[in-house]
Image (tube, rainbow, N blue to C red):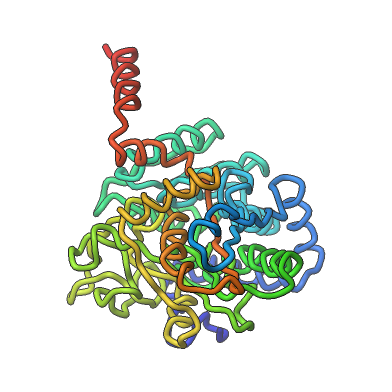
Amino acid sequence: MNSRGYYGEFGGAFIPEILISTFEELVDEFEKAKADPAFWQKYMHIMSTYSCRPTPLTFAENLTSLFGGARIYIKREDLNHTGAHKANNVMGQGLLVKRMGKTRVIAETGAGQHGVATATMAARFGFRCTIYMGEVDIERQRPNVFWMERLGAQVIPVRDGTRTLKDAINEAFRDWVTNMHDTHYVLGTACGPHPFPEMVSYFQSIIGEEARGQIIEREGKLPSRVYACVGGGSNALGVFSGFLDDPVQLVAVEAGGKGLNTGRHAARLSSKDASVGVAQGYKTYFLQDSDGQMKKTHSVAAGLDYVGVSPILASLWQEGRVRFESVMDSEVLDAFSLTLKKEGLVPALESAHAFAQAFKEAPHLSSDDIILINQSGRGDKDIFTVADAYNDAQWQDFIRQKARDYGP
C-alpha cells in the first residue's frame, strides 16, 4: 500500500471535502495506535477476556473421512463473542473511538452480525449507536435486528435503491457528514475510503495469525489451501493475512446466487460481470452497468450481496496471489446441511460458501494435504432463510401459530 491508500491501482480515498479533516484525524490516530505497543496489548486483553480469543481450530474428522482426500480443519470464528469475526474489527475501532474522544458510533450491516457486534461494542464502551440496514436484509435477519435494539442501538431501515448493504453504506456516510464532530463510522468490511481497508484488515489479521500457529502446532506444516467467503472481504483478508508469504493457495469464494448466467448473483472477480469503477469512496471492481450504475445483486446469504470487493483483494487477485471462485445458493445449502449433520457445526450461510468450494476440491487432493476453512460466523441468524429453503412444514406451522397469537 502506498501513502494514499492504494493497493496497486485499487483503493484511494474519494471523499467529499467536508470529510477530509475527519479522515485526516482518523488516519493520524490509527497510525499512532499501530505504533503504540500498549494499544495492541489492550486490544488483545479485551479480545481474550471479553470475546473468545484465541478461537479454536477444529479437525473435521467426519468430513475428512467422507471426502477421502485432504485433511479438513475449520477455524472457529463462530465462537467469537456475538457469533462472528466482526467483533475483532469493532472492538479495535471502539478503542480508536475512545482515543479520539467521540461519543457516538454508526454502522451499516447486511447479515446483521456487524450490527450486533457494533451495538455490543457501543454498550461495552458507553457510546450512542445507530445502525443502518437495508429493508430487505431486515426482513430476512429479524433476530439480529431484535438483539441490536435490545442492546440499545437505533436500527434505521434503508428503503432506497435495492434496500440492501450498499444502500445501508450510503446512508451511513450521509449521517457521518452531518455528525462527524462527535460520531465515528465503524465500517464493517475492508472496503471504503482509506484508511478503512487497511484498518479493518489490521484488526482481522488476528484470525490468520492464530490459524497459522495453530495448524503448525497440530500438523507440523502449513495447509495446502485456505478457503474463505467474500462479500467485502474482511474475514478473508483476516485469515489470508497469516499465509500471504507462504506457499499456500488462498481461495476466495463469492456468491454465485442463482447462477452466473442469470444476473442474480454477487460474483465480482469470479465472473465477467464486474468492471473497475469508483463508488462509496474507493476504486475497485463493481457490479455496474456501462453508465456506472450499480446492478442488483443476489445471494442466499445477506452478508455477501455487496456490489464491490475490497481493493486489497482486487490487487491480490490481479497479482495472481488469491484465486476467486463462486458457488450457487443450492450448493451453499447442501454444504450447510452436510456440515451440520456430519460435524454438528452450524456455519453462517456466508461461511457455507467457503465450505461448498472446499468440498468440491478436497476429494481431488491427497491425504498428505491439509485444507483450512474459515467459519466466519454461526448460522443461528439464518434460521428463517434455512427453514424457508428447506420448506420445513413444522417451522411454517410454528410461524403461522405465532402470527395468530400476535394477531389483532
Q: Is residue 97 visible?
A: no
Picture coordinates of residue 153 (x, y %)? 51, 38
Q: Nearer the viewer, residue 74 or 113?
A: 74
Residue 237 vs 161, above or below: the answer is below
Residue located at (52% from left, 55% from top): 63
Left or right? Give the position of 271 relative to 206: left
Figure quadrant of residue 404: top left
Q: Is residue 61 above or below residue 254?
A: above
Q: How many marks overall?
A: 0
Q: Nearer the viewer, residue 116 or 320?
A: 320
Q: Is residue 269 above or below residue 56?
A: below
Q: Quadrant of the N terminus?
A: bottom right
Locate the C terminus and report the quarter of the image it occupies. top left
Q: Residue at x 24, y 58 (%)?
A: 258
Q: Is residue 367 visible?
A: yes
**Residue 122 locus on image (x, y percent):** 60, 44
Q: Nearer the viewer, residue 295 or 181?
A: 295
Q: Indicate the position of residue 389 as horizontal and vertical percent values.
A: 30, 41
Q: Is residue 403 left or right of residue 196?
A: left
Residue lying at 64% horizontally and 67% vertically, measured from the top left: 208
Percent across and percent down for residue 38 are 81, 63
Q: In the depicted view, which residue is nearer to us: 30 or 42?
A: 42
